[in-house]
Image (spheres, helix red, strand yellow):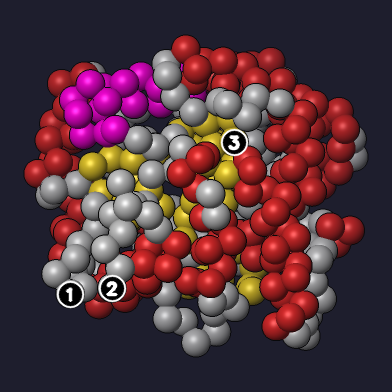
Amino acid sequence: MSSNTFPKLHNAMWPGLVGKGTGPGQEPPISLERMLELTAGAEVDGRKFDGIDYFLFLPHTDPNAGDGQLKKIADLIQGHGFTIGSLVAPVWPGTVGDSAMGDAAAREKFLDAVRMACRIAGVFNKHGVRKYGVIRIDSADGNVEKWSKDPKGNTARIAETFREAARIAADHGERLAAEGEICWAGMHSWKAMLDLLEEVGMPETLGFQADMAHTYLYLMGYNAPEAALLKPGYSQDEFYAAYEMMVDKLRPWTIDFHVAQNDGQVRGAGSHDKTGKHCPAGDPNGKLDIVRCAGYWLKDAPKRGIRHICWDGCMFPNAMLETQGTWNEILDVMLKVRAAHGWKA
């Protein structure tokens, strides 16, 4: 195994929350403490995860928590030997925020969520548990059909909200990364995402968060057939030609990166629906050669300020999340990504 020390390897805490709940047919959330235990328990040839990425909402975090409570969370995370990297701002309706494409009141709620995330980031930074990473956002609006009735006007509205959010982040010394997914209005295709990033026009403060599971679906044109770069039944050569074309467009904007697997199906759970399904690292139905595909995104990563990568396993069943072997397998593929595409400090 390579002796590369960067990028640092992080595990996401939000798979214990996303798609979980108390509604019919839903599985209960998994606590932060348990997610930390499972992450800390992963080990491959004496190597372990370096840190975690963290969702700033209940039940893991009260976004209105005082500094003392946040410092206790920081101590808990640091006690496992972890640093905190990227943070997820609670921008969605039902959390703190609301649609970036909505009316003035909705957009102000969105900005409140960014302010809250920046405040919490500042507490973690001052504590010393966080030294790198971004704050993740999206348009917080799943109505792609509504967006499509006025693509130019709606993208301009989202961009205006994002620019104001970026100014807030810059005032706090933070950067924002917008995660493209086929379920988010104005971010639902590689082309719409690129148009939005260019419309915002603040690459020093607002960039792209690439997730390998979600960007695979960009290739297939789900929710945007006009932007499809592949058709079902594609050959391996066709795949890599299309993959390189897409990544070349988005990589210059990419400041945060999620390693993940995808089986090409579109489904979700609970309120997080109609999006790409994350799969286990070794899923036999996985469409991606994880190590090879990660290399396209990690080219020149240090120049874009990337210091860590994160595994995203949203909507794994609880039985899978609670199995220690799941995390060993994930850590193993993350180590292979770093060996192939990483760098030394």
Q: Residue at x 63, y 73 (%)?
A: 265
Residue contact between numbered discs 1 and 2, judged by CB atoms under 8 Å: yes
Of the residues shown, which amino acid type is indicated by label 3?
Answer: Gly
Q: Disc 1 marks which amino acid?
A: Asp
Query: Is-magenta flag for residue 305?
Result: no
Q: Residue furthest top?
A: 171
Label 2, secondary structure: give it: loop
x and y percentages locating residue 41 in the rendered image: 15, 65
Q: Earlier in the sequence, mark 3 or mark 2?
A: 2
Instruction: Residue at 84%, 57% (x, y): give it.
Output: 227
> Badge 1 is on which residue?
45
**Residue span colored magenta:** 113-131
* C-alpha distance separating marks 1 and 2: 9 Å
290 relative position to 51: left or right: right
Circle 2: residue type: Met
- Rendered image: mark on residue 5: none
Of the numbered discs 1 and 2, the one sitting upstream in the chain is: 2
Residue at label 3? 207
Q: Nearer the viewer, mark 3 or mark 2?
A: 2
> Does residue 127 lie above or below 143 as drawn?
above
Label 1 or label 3, whichever lies nearer to me, is 1
